[in-house]
Image (spheres, helix red, strand yellow):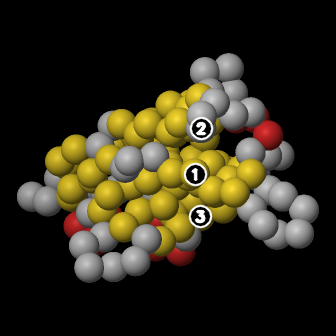
Amino acid sequence: QVQLVESGGGLVQPGGSLRLSCATSGFPFYSWVMRWQRQAPGKERQLVATRGIDGSARYAGPVNGRFHISRDDSEDTMYLQLNSLKQEDTAVYYCNARRLLVGGNDNDYWGQGTQVTVSS
């Protein structure tokens, strides 16, 4: 089965940094698109960053320049480096694996999430 397990979240002061990890198993990690999403209190889950199969990366406007997505194919692990954190970054962060399928009927899988709280 596809498994995604996030870790690395916690409480951090504004301006601080965290590195989130997503340990994966049960699928060809190297051939699926990997994404990080987050859900703040009272809001819908939003896309934060995407790591393409070709190694390309895309970031949402609010985190662009502060966050960095990467992955280690040898370890089947994806990372999200969070820098210069702001209170508005407070959310549950989810790891997402997407298998791209012909016809647009992509398959998505999510982990349980890890809480990031930015507060002084």
Question: Where's residue 61, x and y in %?
Answer: 53, 74
Query: Could you say which quadrant of the image residue 31 lies in?
Result: top right
Real-space Cα distance between discs 2 and 1? 7 Å
Question: Where's residue 65, x and y in %?
Answer: 52, 61
- Label located before the other in sequence (3 or 2): 2
Q: Secondary structure at mark 1?
A: strand
- Label located before the other in sequence (3 or 1): 3
Write the residue at 27% across / 63% down.
90
Q: Secondary structure at mark 3?
A: strand
Q: Which residue is mark 2?
A: 2
Is residue 73 left or right of 14 when viewed as pictured?
right
Callouts 2 and 1 close, C-beta under 8 Å: yes
Foreground disc of the pair 3, 1: 1
Q: Which residue is mark 1?
A: 109
Q: Secondary structure at mark 2?
A: loop
Residue 93's tag is: none
Amino acid carrying mark 2 in the image: Val
Using the rendered image of the protein, determine whether residue 2 is visible from the camera's viewpoint. yes
Q: Nearer the viewer, residue 5 or 37?
A: 5
Question: Where's residue 35, x and y in %?
Answer: 59, 54
> Callout 3: 10 Å neighbours few (<14), some, many (20+)?
some
Q: Which residue is mark 3?
A: 59
